[in-house]
Image (cartoon, helix red, strand yellow):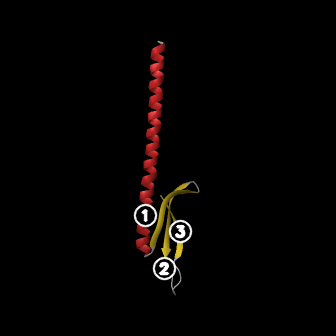
Amino acid sequence: MHKITHSLGAALLLLTVSTGAQAAKQRSNQILLAQDNCFAVGQSIAAERGVTLVAAEATVQNGQNVCKIVVLVPATNGERPKRQVVYIPQ
């Protein structure tokens, strides 16, 4: 009986570790997917506005998942381009 208890305990521990690793991998995949989606959103916004995409990342703002998109807007009169940050809800 004592040996069975140890085997059962080891199996539960292995299952818990395995499940934890799977959950971490799934969260990592979700983060990568969100970043990929944000990059695609950033490309779309840049194309629509005729600006240059600088950066796109998934982030949280006021408890909501958003894409933070950074673009460069062309300036006039030989000035430097303006950096603009846009937040798009996911």
Q: Which residue is mark 3?
A: 85
Residue type beneath disc 1: Val
Does 78 appear above or below 62?
below
Residue type beneath disc 3: Val
> Under tag 3, what secondary structure?
strand
Q: Which residue is mark 2?
A: 74
Question: Residue 73: percent from the left, percent from the top?
Answer: 49, 76
Give the residue drawn at x 48%, y 65%: 55
Q: Which residue is mark 1?
A: 41
Does 10 appear above or below 48?
above
Question: Residue 40: percent from the left, percent from the top?
Answer: 40, 63
Q: CA distance from mark 3 to mark 1?
A: 13 Å
Which tag, 1 or 2, sits closer to the chain's start? 1
Q: Residues within 10 Å of mark 2 (few under 14, many from 20)?
A: some
Which of the numbered marks, if any, corresponds to residue 15?
none
Residue type beneath disc 2: Pro
